[in-house]
Structure formats: structure tokens, C-alpha cells
Amino acid sequence: MLSTNSEQTRRKPNAVDAHVGQRIRQRREWQNMSQTTLGEAIGVTFQQVQKYEKGVNRVGAGRLQQISKALKVEPSYFFEDTLNKIRSEERSASNQINIPPEVVEFVVSKEGIELIRAFSRVGDYRVRRRIVMLVKSLGAHER
């Protein structure tokens, strides 16, 4: 017997939903936009935006279109790298690039995004190399 219970028939978020949520968060932070501001732009609460970003709730096609407009990107932006991600998960561990979790965590953090944004604006290669050397030096003193 088929159940009509919406909880049983509703699809739960999956890895792609989580990826889309992560991309929403990255783009929102890149735009220096708060969850509240994005929520107001698309007609939902900041809590709902938070659930989208964490991959707890799925983002429907219409809502994704609204988010795309608010964040000034094409809807396809949110799916970029999903194929690469799936392929990398299918590869054996020996073929994968081993990025420490703390590095990934930093890169997607607010500070990481701010640092990457600022660093990407530095056009002179020599200055960029000096910045890298400075940060390495500062990090060595922290240990």
C-alpha cells in the first residue's frame, strides 16, 4: 500500500543538495551579503537560508532562480564542480589530492574568503610571492 504521508514521499537532501547549499553560502559571503538580506530578497527567513546553505532543506528550481538573481549568477553556478566532485569521489584514494580538512575548513570560512578575495586583487606576482612568504613566516612563529 502506498503511503500518502508527505514525510515518507518527500525526497531528502542528498550530496548534490549539500553542494548547492555550500555554493549558495560561498557566493553570498563573496557578495558580503547576510543571510537576512538574501532571505529578504527571495522572500524567506534567514533560518530558511541557513537550512538551504547547510543542505538540510532542498532548494527548488524556482527558489534557485530567485537566489541566482539575488546573488547575480546563473543557476548553473550552483552546480559547478559537482561532476568533478563526483568523479573525484569515484577515484581511488591514491589518485586523489589529499587536502587536509583544516585547509578546506579555512578556505570556506569567512576569514578564508576575505583573504582569498583580497589576495586575488593583488596583480603583481612578486608582491603575491612576498605575501605568501610573510604569511608562512607568521605561521611559523605561531607554532
Image (spheres, helix red, strand yellow):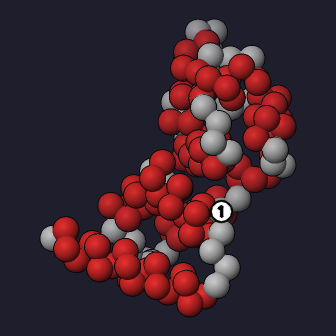
Left or right of 36: which side holds 106? Answer: left
Residue at left offset 77%, top offset 28%: 63
Q: Where in the figure is residue 24, as x and y percent of width and height?
A: 64, 42
Q: Is residue 79 visible?
A: yes
Report which quarter residue 100 is drawn in: bottom left
Q: Which amino acid, by three-letter code, is at mark 1?
A: Asp
What residue lies at 65% left-to-right and 62% top-to-bottom? 81
Residue extending farthest to the bottom is 126
Q: Position of residue 19 (x, y in %)?
A: 58, 48
Viewed as shown, does residue 62 lie left or right of 24? right
Residue under pointer 1: 81
Count residues near mark 1 (Cα–Cα under 10 Å), then give few for <14, some for 14-19, many for 20+. Answer: few
The one nearer the camera, 9 or 133, is 133
Name the image quarter holding the N terminus. Answer: top right
Q: Position of residue 137 (x, y in %)?
A: 29, 80
Q: 143 or 69, which lies in front? A: 143
- Residue depicted at 76% across the width and 24% down the height: 41
Label 1 SS: loop
Can residue 57 be seen at all in this image of the molecule?
no
Q: Nearer the viewer, residue 110 or 10?
A: 110
Please indicate whether residue 34 sits to the left or right of residue 95 in the image: right
Q: Is residue 122 above or below residue 26?
A: below
Q: How many marks?
A: 1
Q: Is residue 91 above or below residue 67?
A: below
Q: Residue most toward the top?
A: 4
In percent of the image, x 37 and y 79: which residue is there?
134
Residue closer to the observer: 125 or 16? 125
Q: Position of residue 13 (x, y in %)?
A: 56, 34
Q: Is residue 90 left or right of residue 9?
A: left
Which quadrant would the C terminus be assigned to in this image? bottom left
